[in-house]
Amino acid sequence: ARYIRSEASSAKPTVDGLTTVVASNFDQLVLKSENDVFIQFHAPWCSHCKEMGPALADLGKKMKEEDVTVARFDATANEYDKEKFQV
């Protein structure tokens, strides 16, 4: 088995409608999700990503009861399929 760089997954990845995805739970929470997934691949140091943070959290709260998962993924600390997701 190949090692995949991943942050530790949270016991409760979804808080107030916003789901934090890491490499180790990406398949489960994104690719195999029964919901559509709106995901932000971000870098913690990126000013544009920081500016979008509150809007993404607000969207998560608004979509909590819908069949949509609003998620964020730290693309600097977690491995992802760079061919499938061009970040």
Image: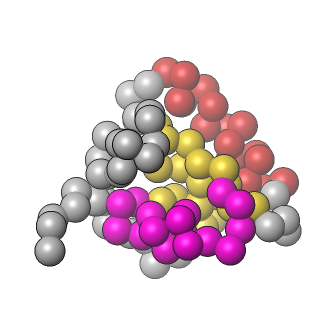
Residue drawn at x 55%, y 72% is: 32
The image position of residue 48, as x and y in percent, is 54, 22
Residue 34 appears left or right of 44: right
Residue 16 appears left or right of 47: right
The image position of residue 63, as x and y in percent, is 81, 58
Residue drawn at x 36%, y 60% is: 23
Q: Quadrant of residue 76?
A: top left
Q: Which residues are magenta?
A: 22-37
Q: Quadrant of the C terminus?
A: top left
Q: Is residue 13 visible?
A: no
Residue drawn at x 80%, y 67% is: 67
Q: Residue furthest bottom?
A: 11
Q: Quadrant of residue 2?
A: bottom left
Residue drawn at x 48%, y 60% is: 21
Observer-nearest of 59 and 87: 87
Decide: is 79 above or below 2: above
Residue 35 appears left or right of 40: right
Observer-nearest of 85 and 50: 85
